[in-house]
Protein backbone atom coordinates (compact mmCIF):
# COMPACT_ATOMS: atom_id res chain seq x y z
CA UNK A 1 0.00 0.00 0.00
CA UNK A 2 1.23 3.53 -0.75
CA UNK A 3 0.63 6.16 1.93
CA UNK A 4 1.33 9.89 1.56
CA UNK A 5 0.86 12.77 4.03
CA UNK A 6 1.44 16.51 4.20
CA UNK A 7 4.50 18.03 5.82
CA UNK A 8 4.25 18.48 9.57
CA UNK A 9 5.21 21.76 11.35
CA UNK A 10 8.57 21.54 13.10
CA UNK A 11 7.79 24.24 15.74
CA UNK A 12 11.26 25.81 15.48
CA UNK A 13 13.14 22.72 14.41
CA UNK A 14 13.03 20.82 11.10
CA UNK A 15 11.23 17.53 10.86
CA UNK A 16 13.80 14.79 10.82
CA UNK A 17 11.68 11.63 10.65
CA UNK A 18 8.25 10.23 10.25
CA UNK A 19 7.31 7.05 12.10
CA UNK A 20 4.55 4.93 10.53
CA UNK A 21 2.81 2.16 12.47
CA UNK A 22 0.58 -0.41 10.71
CA UNK A 23 -0.51 -3.94 11.43
CA UNK A 24 1.53 -4.04 14.66
CA UNK A 25 4.75 -2.93 13.02
CA UNK A 26 6.59 0.42 13.07
CA UNK A 27 8.74 1.82 10.32
CA UNK A 28 10.81 4.99 9.94
CA UNK A 29 10.76 6.71 6.58
CA UNK A 30 12.96 9.70 7.41
CA UNK A 31 11.85 13.07 6.15
CA UNK A 32 9.94 11.56 3.20
CA UNK A 33 6.27 12.50 2.91
CA UNK A 34 5.12 8.98 1.94
CA UNK A 35 6.09 5.37 1.52
CA UNK A 36 5.03 1.97 0.32
CA UNK A 37 4.05 -0.63 2.91
CA UNK A 38 3.35 -4.32 2.68
CA UNK A 39 0.22 -5.76 4.23
CA UNK A 40 -0.79 -9.41 4.51
CA UNK A 41 -3.93 -9.37 2.35
CA UNK A 42 -5.77 -7.30 -0.17
CA UNK A 43 -9.23 -6.06 0.66
CA UNK A 44 -8.70 -5.90 4.43
CA UNK A 45 -8.93 -2.52 6.19
CA UNK A 46 -5.64 -1.48 7.74
CA UNK A 47 -5.12 1.52 10.14
CA UNK A 48 -2.01 3.62 9.63
CA UNK A 49 -0.66 5.90 12.38
CA UNK A 50 1.91 8.58 11.43
CA UNK A 51 4.01 10.54 13.95
CA UNK A 52 6.41 13.34 12.96
CA UNK A 53 9.67 13.91 14.87
CA UNK A 54 12.14 16.77 15.07
CA UNK A 55 15.44 16.97 16.88
CA UNK A 56 13.82 17.34 20.25
CA UNK A 57 10.45 15.63 20.34
CA UNK A 58 7.63 13.74 18.58
CA UNK A 59 4.48 15.40 17.45
CA UNK A 60 0.89 14.21 17.74
CA UNK A 61 -0.16 11.15 15.71
CA UNK A 62 -2.44 11.13 12.72
CA UNK A 63 -4.53 8.05 11.85
CA UNK A 64 -6.04 6.89 8.55
CA UNK A 65 -7.65 3.64 7.35
CA UNK A 66 -6.79 2.19 3.93
CA UNK A 67 -7.09 -0.90 1.76
CA UNK A 68 -4.84 -2.83 -0.59
CA UNK A 69 -6.25 -4.05 -3.92
CA UNK A 70 -4.90 -6.57 -6.42
CA UNK A 71 -6.05 -8.15 -9.66
CA UNK A 72 -9.19 -10.23 -9.15
CA UNK A 73 -9.30 -13.89 -10.21
CA UNK A 74 -11.70 -16.75 -10.93
CA UNK A 75 -10.70 -19.67 -8.75
CA UNK A 76 -13.66 -21.92 -9.54
CA UNK A 77 -15.10 -23.38 -12.71
CA UNK A 78 -17.09 -21.72 -15.45
CA UNK A 79 -20.04 -24.04 -16.00
CA UNK A 80 -22.49 -23.82 -18.93
CA UNK A 81 -25.80 -25.71 -18.66
CA UNK A 82 -28.60 -25.86 -21.16
CA UNK A 83 -32.34 -25.69 -20.78
CA UNK A 84 -34.35 -28.89 -21.03
CA UNK A 85 -34.05 -30.24 -24.60
CA UNK A 86 -37.04 -29.34 -26.73
CA UNK A 87 -38.26 -29.75 -30.28
CA UNK A 88 -36.50 -26.60 -31.41
CA UNK A 89 -33.41 -25.62 -33.37
CA UNK A 90 -32.30 -23.25 -30.59
CA UNK A 91 -32.05 -23.33 -26.82
CA UNK A 92 -30.98 -21.26 -23.81
CA UNK A 93 -27.64 -21.77 -22.07
CA UNK A 94 -26.97 -20.62 -18.51
CA UNK A 95 -23.32 -19.90 -17.65
CA UNK A 96 -22.39 -19.89 -13.97
CA UNK A 97 -19.06 -18.43 -12.82
CA UNK A 98 -17.84 -20.00 -9.60
CA UNK A 99 -15.18 -18.87 -7.15
CA UNK A 100 -14.67 -15.22 -8.08
CA UNK A 101 -11.99 -13.62 -5.86
CA UNK A 102 -12.29 -9.83 -5.75
CA UNK A 103 -8.79 -9.43 -4.23
CA UNK A 104 -9.64 -5.96 -2.93
CA UNK A 105 -12.32 -3.94 -1.22
CA UNK A 106 -14.63 -3.59 -4.20
CA UNK A 107 -16.99 -6.30 -5.45
CA UNK A 108 -16.40 -7.82 -8.85
CA UNK A 109 -18.45 -7.47 -11.99
CA UNK A 110 -18.69 -10.32 -14.50
CA UNK A 111 -18.25 -10.49 -18.25
CA UNK A 112 -18.96 -13.68 -20.22
CA UNK A 113 -17.63 -14.23 -23.72
CA UNK A 114 -18.92 -16.68 -26.29
CA UNK A 115 -16.37 -17.70 -28.89
CA UNK A 116 -14.24 -14.67 -27.98
CA UNK A 117 -16.99 -12.04 -28.08
CA UNK A 118 -18.63 -10.59 -25.00
CA UNK A 119 -22.32 -11.36 -24.71
CA UNK A 120 -24.16 -8.01 -24.58
CA UNK A 121 -26.46 -9.22 -21.82
CA UNK A 122 -23.54 -10.50 -19.75
CA UNK A 123 -21.05 -7.65 -19.92
CA UNK A 124 -20.10 -6.01 -16.64
CA UNK A 125 -22.99 -7.57 -14.68
CA UNK A 126 -23.04 -8.07 -10.94
CA UNK A 127 -24.60 -11.56 -11.13
CA UNK A 128 -22.36 -14.57 -11.51
CA UNK A 129 -25.08 -16.19 -13.67
CA UNK A 130 -25.32 -15.30 -17.34
CA UNK A 131 -28.19 -16.36 -19.62
CA UNK A 132 -27.38 -16.82 -23.30
CA UNK A 133 -30.50 -17.09 -25.44
CA UNK A 134 -31.00 -18.26 -29.03
CA UNK A 135 -28.11 -20.73 -28.96
CA UNK A 136 -28.11 -23.19 -31.86
CA UNK A 137 -28.45 -26.84 -30.86
CA UNK A 138 -25.70 -29.05 -32.18
CA UNK A 139 -23.13 -26.26 -32.50
CA UNK A 140 -20.07 -26.29 -30.25
CA UNK A 141 -19.33 -23.10 -28.30
CA UNK A 142 -16.46 -21.94 -26.08
CA UNK A 143 -17.53 -19.85 -23.09
CA UNK A 144 -15.03 -17.84 -21.04
CA UNK A 145 -15.49 -15.37 -18.17
CA UNK A 146 -13.53 -12.51 -16.61
CA UNK A 147 -14.13 -10.55 -13.41
CA UNK A 148 -13.17 -6.89 -12.86
CA UNK A 149 -12.90 -4.45 -9.96
CA UNK A 150 -12.41 -0.69 -9.88
CA UNK A 151 -10.66 0.85 -6.86
CA UNK A 152 -9.33 4.36 -6.54
CA UNK A 153 -10.02 4.88 -10.22
CA UNK A 154 -8.04 1.85 -11.33
CA UNK A 155 -9.85 -1.03 -13.04
CA UNK A 156 -8.28 -4.46 -12.70
CA UNK A 157 -9.46 -7.44 -14.78
CA UNK A 158 -8.73 -11.10 -14.21
CA UNK A 159 -7.31 -13.51 -16.70
CA UNK A 160 -10.13 -15.23 -18.66
CA UNK A 161 -11.33 -18.58 -17.33
CA UNK A 162 -12.72 -20.92 -20.01
CA UNK A 163 -15.28 -23.67 -19.77
CA UNK A 164 -14.84 -26.91 -21.65
CA UNK A 165 -16.23 -26.72 -25.21
CA UNK A 166 -19.99 -27.00 -24.90
CA UNK A 167 -22.50 -28.36 -27.40
CA UNK A 168 -26.16 -28.02 -26.47
CA UNK A 169 -28.62 -30.51 -27.92
CA UNK A 170 -32.33 -30.59 -28.50
CA UNK A 171 -34.90 -33.08 -29.66
CA UNK A 172 -34.12 -34.13 -33.27
CA UNK A 173 -36.32 -32.67 -35.96
CA UNK A 174 -39.28 -34.67 -37.22
CA UNK A 175 -39.07 -37.12 -40.13
CA UNK A 176 -40.82 -35.38 -43.00
CA UNK A 177 -39.63 -37.42 -45.99
CA UNK A 178 -40.98 -40.96 -46.53
CA UNK A 179 -38.69 -43.95 -46.12
CA UNK A 180 -38.48 -46.15 -49.23
CA UNK A 181 -38.00 -49.89 -48.65
CA UNK A 182 -37.39 -52.47 -51.36
CA UNK A 183 -36.25 -56.07 -51.58
CA UNK A 184 -32.50 -56.23 -52.24
CA UNK A 185 -31.75 -59.87 -52.99
CA UNK A 186 -33.11 -63.43 -52.87
CA UNK A 187 -31.99 -63.91 -49.26
CA UNK A 188 -34.62 -61.82 -47.43
CA UNK A 189 -32.45 -58.70 -47.87
CA UNK A 190 -34.02 -55.22 -47.73
CA UNK A 191 -32.50 -51.85 -48.70
CA UNK A 192 -33.78 -48.61 -47.19
CA UNK A 193 -33.48 -45.16 -48.77
CA UNK A 194 -34.19 -42.29 -46.40
CA UNK A 195 -33.73 -38.60 -45.62
CA UNK A 196 -32.63 -38.07 -42.03
CA UNK A 197 -33.71 -34.90 -40.17
CA UNK A 198 -31.18 -32.83 -38.23
CA UNK A 199 -30.21 -34.47 -34.95
CA UNK A 200 -29.86 -31.07 -33.20
CA UNK A 201 -26.77 -32.40 -31.49
CA UNK A 202 -23.11 -32.99 -32.28
CA UNK A 203 -23.75 -36.64 -33.15
CA UNK A 204 -26.36 -38.38 -35.29
CA UNK A 205 -26.98 -42.09 -34.82
CA UNK A 206 -29.45 -43.53 -37.34
CA UNK A 207 -30.98 -46.98 -36.91
CA UNK A 208 -33.67 -49.11 -38.54
CA UNK A 209 -36.04 -51.76 -37.22
CA UNK A 210 -37.47 -54.33 -39.66
CA UNK A 211 -39.22 -56.29 -36.94
CA UNK A 212 -36.24 -57.96 -35.27
CA UNK A 213 -34.75 -55.04 -33.31
CA UNK A 214 -32.81 -51.86 -34.04
CA UNK A 215 -29.67 -51.97 -36.17
CA UNK A 216 -27.46 -48.99 -37.01
CA UNK A 217 -27.39 -47.76 -40.60
CA UNK A 218 -25.37 -45.01 -42.32
CA UNK A 219 -25.94 -41.46 -41.04
CA UNK A 220 -25.40 -38.35 -43.20
CA UNK A 221 -24.28 -36.39 -40.09
CA UNK A 222 -25.83 -34.06 -37.51
CA UNK A 223 -27.23 -31.72 -40.16
CA UNK A 224 -29.24 -34.55 -41.72
CA UNK A 225 -29.60 -35.50 -45.36
CA UNK A 226 -30.15 -38.43 -47.70
CA UNK A 227 -28.60 -41.86 -47.19
CA UNK A 228 -29.04 -45.50 -48.20
CA UNK A 229 -28.61 -48.58 -46.06
CA UNK A 230 -26.77 -51.75 -46.99
CA UNK A 231 -28.85 -54.89 -47.38
CA UNK A 232 -30.59 -55.54 -44.06
CA UNK A 233 -32.10 -58.81 -42.85
CA UNK A 234 -35.85 -58.67 -43.31
CA UNK A 235 -38.53 -61.04 -42.13
CA UNK A 236 -39.44 -63.57 -44.81
CA UNK A 237 -42.75 -62.55 -46.32
CA UNK A 238 -42.20 -58.86 -45.56
CA UNK A 239 -43.17 -56.55 -42.72
CA UNK A 240 -42.96 -52.95 -41.54
CA UNK A 241 -39.76 -50.85 -41.42
CA UNK A 242 -39.27 -47.99 -38.94
CA UNK A 243 -36.31 -45.62 -38.61
CA UNK A 244 -35.06 -43.27 -35.90
CA UNK A 245 -32.33 -40.71 -35.33
CA UNK A 246 -30.76 -40.03 -31.92
CA UNK A 247 -28.17 -37.56 -30.61
CA UNK A 248 -25.65 -37.75 -27.80
CA UNK A 249 -28.27 -36.68 -25.29
CA UNK A 250 -30.31 -39.81 -25.96
CA UNK A 251 -33.05 -37.76 -27.62
CA UNK A 252 -34.63 -39.48 -30.62
CA UNK A 253 -37.35 -39.06 -33.20
CA UNK A 254 -38.87 -41.92 -35.14
CA UNK A 255 -40.24 -42.20 -38.66
CA UNK A 256 -43.57 -43.66 -39.60
CA UNK A 257 -43.68 -47.35 -40.47
CA UNK A 258 -43.51 -48.36 -44.14
CA UNK A 259 -44.16 -51.83 -45.60
CA UNK A 260 -41.37 -53.82 -47.19
CA UNK A 261 -41.05 -57.03 -49.22
CA UNK A 262 -38.48 -59.71 -48.43
CA UNK A 263 -38.23 -63.20 -49.83
CA UNK A 264 -35.91 -66.02 -50.78
CA UNK A 265 -35.54 -67.85 -54.06
CA UNK A 266 -38.20 -70.40 -54.89
CA UNK A 267 -37.41 -74.12 -54.63
CA UNK A 268 -37.47 -76.73 -57.37
CA UNK A 269 -40.71 -78.76 -57.20
CA UNK A 270 -40.42 -82.15 -55.52
CA UNK A 271 -42.77 -85.00 -56.50
CA UNK A 272 -44.71 -86.88 -53.82
CA UNK A 273 -47.35 -89.62 -53.62
CA UNK A 274 -46.45 -91.26 -56.95
CA UNK A 275 -48.45 -94.41 -57.70
CA UNK A 276 -49.51 -96.75 -60.51
CA UNK A 277 -52.81 -98.59 -60.22
CA UNK A 278 -53.68 -100.57 -63.31
CA UNK A 279 -53.73 -98.10 -66.17
CA UNK A 280 -53.95 -95.07 -63.85
CA UNK A 281 -50.81 -93.14 -62.89
CA UNK A 282 -50.95 -90.55 -60.09
CA UNK A 283 -48.43 -88.16 -58.55
CA UNK A 284 -48.36 -85.05 -56.36
CA UNK A 285 -45.87 -82.22 -55.96
CA UNK A 286 -44.71 -79.67 -53.39
CA UNK A 287 -42.50 -76.58 -53.41
CA UNK A 288 -41.80 -73.43 -51.37
CA UNK A 289 -42.62 -69.88 -52.53
CA UNK A 290 -40.49 -68.47 -49.67
CA UNK A 291 -42.18 -65.17 -48.98
CA UNK A 292 -43.52 -63.93 -52.30
CA UNK A 293 -46.46 -65.20 -54.32
CA UNK A 294 -45.68 -67.95 -56.81
CA UNK A 295 -47.82 -70.44 -58.72
CA UNK A 296 -47.21 -74.20 -58.61
CA UNK A 297 -48.59 -76.13 -61.59
CA UNK A 298 -48.67 -79.90 -62.12
CA UNK A 299 -49.62 -81.13 -65.60
CA UNK A 300 -50.11 -84.74 -66.72
CA UNK A 301 -51.25 -86.49 -69.92
CA UNK A 302 -54.90 -85.66 -69.35
CA UNK A 303 -54.84 -82.37 -67.45
CA UNK A 304 -53.43 -80.67 -64.38
CA UNK A 305 -53.88 -78.46 -61.34
CA UNK A 306 -52.42 -75.19 -60.04
CA UNK A 307 -52.15 -73.49 -56.67
CA UNK A 308 -50.72 -70.12 -55.62
CA UNK A 309 -49.35 -68.62 -52.42
CA UNK A 310 -46.30 -67.19 -50.71
CA UNK A 311 -45.47 -70.08 -48.38
CA UNK A 312 -45.42 -73.86 -48.70
CA UNK A 313 -47.32 -75.04 -51.78
CA UNK A 314 -48.63 -78.55 -52.45
CA UNK A 315 -50.81 -80.37 -54.95
CA UNK A 316 -51.74 -83.67 -53.34
CA UNK A 317 -52.21 -85.69 -56.53
CA UNK A 318 -53.02 -85.48 -60.22
CA UNK A 319 -54.07 -88.73 -61.90
CA UNK A 320 -54.14 -89.78 -65.52
CA UNK A 321 -55.55 -92.87 -67.19
CA UNK A 322 -53.11 -93.90 -69.91
CA UNK A 323 -54.04 -97.52 -70.63
CA UNK A 324 -51.82 -100.56 -70.48
CA UNK A 325 -48.17 -100.56 -71.47
CA UNK A 326 -48.05 -96.76 -71.48
CA UNK A 327 -45.72 -94.17 -69.92
CA UNK A 328 -47.29 -91.17 -68.19
CA UNK A 329 -45.17 -87.98 -68.16
CA UNK A 330 -45.86 -85.29 -65.54
CA UNK A 331 -44.28 -81.81 -65.45
CA UNK A 332 -44.25 -79.46 -62.44
CA UNK A 333 -43.39 -75.76 -62.65
CA UNK A 334 -43.10 -73.05 -60.00
CA UNK A 335 -43.57 -69.61 -61.55
CA UNK A 336 -42.82 -66.31 -59.79
CA UNK A 337 -45.31 -63.44 -59.78
CA UNK A 338 -44.44 -59.88 -60.83
CA UNK A 339 -42.29 -57.66 -58.59
CA UNK A 340 -42.75 -53.88 -58.13
CA UNK A 341 -40.08 -51.18 -58.17
CA UNK A 342 -37.48 -53.29 -59.91
CA UNK A 343 -37.20 -55.76 -57.04
CA UNK A 344 -35.30 -58.95 -57.95
CA UNK A 345 -37.29 -61.60 -59.78
CA UNK A 346 -37.02 -65.36 -59.39
CA UNK A 347 -36.62 -67.76 -62.28
CA UNK A 348 -39.12 -70.49 -63.09
CA UNK A 349 -38.27 -73.85 -61.51
CA UNK A 350 -39.29 -77.09 -63.30
CA UNK A 351 -39.14 -80.81 -62.70
CA UNK A 352 -40.44 -83.93 -64.50
CA UNK A 353 -41.63 -87.35 -63.37
CA UNK A 354 -42.88 -90.39 -65.26
CA UNK A 355 -44.19 -93.90 -64.62
CA UNK A 356 -45.38 -96.77 -66.83
CA UNK A 357 -48.43 -98.97 -66.61
CA UNK A 358 -48.21 -102.75 -66.88
CA UNK A 359 -49.02 -104.62 -70.11
CA UNK A 360 -52.50 -106.07 -70.65
CA UNK A 361 -52.45 -109.83 -70.05
CA UNK A 362 -54.65 -112.86 -70.32
CA UNK A 363 -54.13 -115.98 -68.25
CA UNK A 364 -54.99 -119.52 -69.38
CA UNK A 365 -55.58 -122.38 -66.98
CA UNK A 366 -56.90 -125.92 -67.44
CA UNK A 367 -59.50 -127.39 -65.17
CA UNK A 368 -60.02 -131.02 -64.16
CA UNK A 369 -60.87 -133.40 -67.02
CA UNK A 370 -64.29 -134.81 -67.51
CA UNK A 371 -65.84 -137.43 -69.76
CA UNK A 372 -67.07 -136.21 -73.06
CA UNK A 373 -67.82 -137.54 -76.59
CA UNK A 374 -64.15 -137.08 -77.43
CA UNK A 375 -63.11 -139.11 -74.45
CA UNK A 376 -61.78 -136.78 -71.79
CA UNK A 377 -62.31 -133.07 -72.03
CA UNK A 378 -60.45 -130.43 -70.07
CA UNK A 379 -62.16 -127.10 -69.46
CA UNK A 380 -59.98 -124.07 -70.29
CA UNK A 381 -60.44 -120.77 -68.42
CA UNK A 382 -59.38 -117.28 -69.54
CA UNK A 383 -58.77 -114.45 -67.01
CA UNK A 384 -58.14 -110.84 -68.15
CA UNK A 385 -55.81 -108.38 -66.35
CA UNK A 386 -54.89 -104.68 -66.90
CA UNK A 387 -56.76 -103.97 -70.10
CA UNK A 388 -58.11 -100.54 -70.95
CA UNK A 389 -60.64 -99.66 -68.28
CA UNK A 390 -64.28 -100.27 -69.08
CA UNK A 391 -63.49 -101.56 -72.54
CA UNK A 392 -64.11 -104.85 -74.38
CA UNK A 393 -61.58 -107.61 -75.02
CA UNK A 394 -61.95 -110.18 -77.82
CA UNK A 395 -60.50 -113.67 -77.32
CA UNK A 396 -60.29 -116.29 -80.14
CA UNK A 397 -59.20 -119.92 -80.35
CA UNK A 398 -58.89 -121.94 -83.58
CA UNK A 399 -60.91 -125.13 -83.32
CA UNK A 400 -59.39 -128.51 -84.08
CA UNK A 401 -61.95 -131.09 -85.01
CA UNK A 402 -64.56 -128.68 -83.81
CA UNK A 403 -65.69 -125.16 -84.50
CA UNK A 404 -63.69 -122.05 -83.54
CA UNK A 405 -64.21 -120.58 -80.11
CA UNK A 406 -64.46 -116.86 -79.41
CA UNK A 407 -65.80 -114.58 -76.72
CA UNK A 408 -65.98 -110.80 -76.17
CA UNK A 409 -65.92 -109.71 -72.54
CA UNK A 410 -66.18 -106.31 -70.87
CA UNK A 411 -63.47 -105.37 -68.38
CA UNK A 412 -64.05 -103.28 -65.31
CA UNK A 413 -62.59 -99.92 -64.30
CA UNK A 414 -59.33 -101.63 -63.38
CA UNK A 415 -59.16 -103.42 -66.76
CA UNK A 416 -59.91 -106.87 -65.33
CA UNK A 417 -62.39 -109.71 -65.89
CA UNK A 418 -62.80 -112.87 -63.89
CA UNK A 419 -62.13 -116.30 -65.36
CA UNK A 420 -64.51 -117.34 -68.15
CA UNK A 421 -64.81 -120.00 -70.86
CA UNK A 422 -68.17 -119.31 -72.37
CA UNK A 423 -68.72 -118.03 -75.86
CA UNK A 424 -71.43 -117.88 -78.52
CA UNK A 425 -70.30 -121.27 -79.89
CA UNK A 426 -70.10 -122.89 -76.48
CA UNK A 427 -67.53 -123.29 -73.78
CA UNK A 428 -63.80 -123.48 -74.36
CA UNK A 429 -62.33 -126.96 -73.80
CA UNK A 430 -59.24 -128.90 -74.66
CA UNK A 431 -59.62 -132.58 -75.58
CA UNK A 432 -55.92 -133.20 -75.62
CA UNK A 433 -55.22 -131.40 -72.38
CA UNK A 434 -52.24 -129.64 -73.91
CA UNK A 435 -53.67 -127.90 -76.91
CA UNK A 436 -53.52 -124.57 -75.09
CA UNK A 437 -50.65 -123.51 -72.87
CA UNK A 438 -51.31 -122.54 -69.30
CA UNK A 439 -49.73 -119.27 -68.20
CA UNK A 440 -49.85 -115.50 -68.57
CA UNK A 441 -49.62 -113.88 -71.99
CA UNK A 442 -49.60 -110.28 -73.20
CA UNK A 443 -52.23 -108.91 -75.53
CA UNK A 444 -51.97 -110.38 -79.02
CA UNK A 445 -49.58 -113.18 -78.01
CA UNK A 446 -50.41 -116.68 -79.28
CA UNK A 447 -51.03 -119.14 -76.46
CA UNK A 448 -51.41 -122.32 -78.45
CA UNK A 449 -53.75 -120.94 -81.09
CA UNK A 450 -55.54 -118.74 -78.54
CA UNK A 451 -55.07 -115.01 -78.30
CA UNK A 452 -56.84 -111.95 -76.85
CA UNK A 453 -56.91 -108.43 -78.31
CA UNK A 454 -58.20 -105.06 -77.24
CA UNK A 455 -61.42 -103.88 -78.86
Image: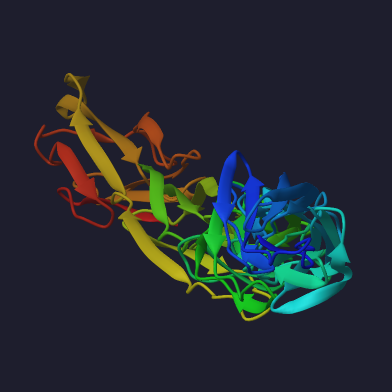
Q: Tell which residue pokes out farthest to the front in this image.
A: 12
Across and down, in percent, residue 346 comes to 50, 72
The quadrant the N terminus occupies is bottom right
Q: Is residue 133 visible?
A: no
Q: Is 252 or 28 nearer to us in this picture?
A: 28
Q: Is 398 or 444 nearer to us in this picture?
A: 444
Q: In the image, is residue 225 above or below residue 234?
A: below
Across and down, in percent, residue 32 comes to 64, 69
Q: Is residue 99 visible?
A: yes
- Quarter holding residue 223: bottom right
Tell whether 350 sits left or right of 336.
Answer: left
Residue at 16 percent across and 20 percent down: it is: 369
Tell whether 59 sits left or right of 184.
Answer: right
Q: Is 414 or 90 nearer to us in this picture?
A: 90
Across and down, in percent, residue 360 comes to 31, 49
How many numbered badges does the structure rendering display? 0
Across and down, in percent, residue 303 comes to 57, 61
Residue at 77 percent across and 71 percent down: it is: 155
- Colour scheme of this structure image? rainbow
- Quarter holding residue 25: top right
Tell whether 89 sits left or right of 420.
Answer: right
Q: Is 450 or 134 nearer to us in this picture?
A: 134
The quadrant the C terminus occupies is bottom left
Amino acid sequence: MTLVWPSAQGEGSNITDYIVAVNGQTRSVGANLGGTFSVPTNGTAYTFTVVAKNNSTSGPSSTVTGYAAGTPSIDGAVVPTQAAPADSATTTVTITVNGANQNGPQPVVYTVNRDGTALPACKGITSRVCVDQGVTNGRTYTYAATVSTTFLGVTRTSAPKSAAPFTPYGVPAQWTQPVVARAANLNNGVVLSYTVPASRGKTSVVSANLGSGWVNVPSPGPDGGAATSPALAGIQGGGQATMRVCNEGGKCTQSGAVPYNSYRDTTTPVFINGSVSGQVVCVGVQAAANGWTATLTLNGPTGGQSTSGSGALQIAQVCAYVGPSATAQFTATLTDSAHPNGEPARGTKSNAWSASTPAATFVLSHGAGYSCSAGTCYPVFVTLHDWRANSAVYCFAKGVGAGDWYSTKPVDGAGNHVAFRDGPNGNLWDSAGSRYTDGSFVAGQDAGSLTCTQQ
